[in-house]
Image (cartoon, helix red, strand yellow):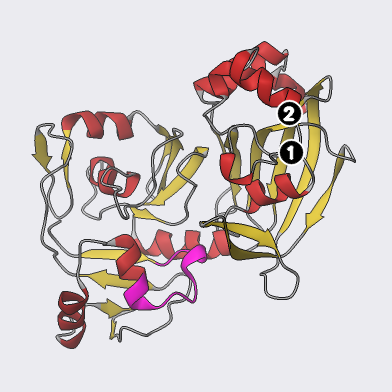
Amino acid sequence: MSGVQQITVEAEESETRLDRWFKRRFPELNHGRLEKLLRTGQIRVDGGRAKANQRLETGQVVRVPPLESKAPASGLPAVKVPRGFAISDQDAATVQGMVIFKDDDLIALNKPPGLAVQGGTKTTKHLDGMLDALRFGFDDRPRLVHRLDRDTSGVIVVARTVKSAAVLARSFQSRDMQKTYWALVMGYPEHPAGTINAALAKSAVSGRERMEWDDEEGKSAVTDYRVIDTAARRFTWLELSPRTGRTHQLRAHCALIGTPIVGDHKYAIRQKHLDQRVDLHDGLLSGVADNMCLHARALVIERPGKKPLSLKAPLPKHMKDAFKDLGFNEKDADE
């Protein structure tokens, strides 16, 4: 990439060491090069010099100097955008087609399933790499202020200025932000509505890292839920409202109450819901068997001096098709 970036630390990145933060966001940057940039003061946090072991806090702004660029892995013709990534015309059109709202402070997108938000090992195509196409005349490059899992679709917000990035990052960290997710799950919960209060911690199971219920070592995680509709209690449409923002929180919480999200193989309950899995692979819902049915449906953002901003994202095709097959009506969510 080229040009200086000012990147705001997200809530989920709080307490992360600076060197690990760089490794996650810029995997191509080796440790020696990072140390040199730190020694020469080219990397700064909130305007001050920084060290590799410094712990970051939500809302802080990290200055990232120009880094060595790489050619796009896609082989598509590249368009050089000033002070940022080189992106193809196709990717630029794709990300611009995701826009569902735009003003001087932020841009809201409807992220499709399968698109990573940030880069990492073996991830060369991601939303962060396309953000230069969303400048729309602004000098500043848009900044990510929160994330969604690769396979989760729906509303995601990027800030258009350093100031709005700091305000939005604090909003996402607070409990005032109203977030609504829709999930298609297997089975039916014990109660049609309730609150899941189960602390979560990372745990390696069968060589795969996932979040597990751990009241002693885990971080507090709270999710409100309600049933909107069900198909003979074999498949259920849940509305989920997270009060906290832990990694994989909704996926882990749905599995904990015995209703794993359709298509979520990491948190699937293997010995349960056998009949539903037959339906997924051989019958009614074969089209969603390998697609996770979790969608960030709505977001309400409180903004100082302005009316609350209400954002809604239409369902992705695989969930829309599944809802149709099961006889679910989106209007039922408003009742």
Q: Amino acid at mark 2?
A: Leu
Proximity of marks 2 and 1: CB atoms separated by less than 8 Å? yes
Relative horizontal placement of residue 107, taking residue 95 as reference (left or right): right
Instruction: Check residue 19 for magenta coloring.
Output: yes
Above or below, comparing residue 91 to residue 255 in the picture: above
Query: Residue, x 25% and y 46% (percent of image)?
Result: 124
Residue extent of the magenta highlight: 9-20
Q: Where does label 2 land, which residue?
A: 274
- Res 108 seen here: yes
Relative horizontal placement of residue 159, taking residue 302 as reference (left or right): left
Q: Secondary structure at mark 2?
A: helix
Q: Where does label 1 land, which residue?
A: 271
Q: Quadrant of the C terminus?
A: top right
Give 284 or 88, whichever is nearer the viewer.
284
- Res 308 seen here: no
Instruction: Check residue 251 for magenta coloring.
Output: no
Task: Say few, some or many: other residues with alpha carbon within 10 Å of mark 1 (under 14 / 14 to 19 / 20 or more).
Answer: few
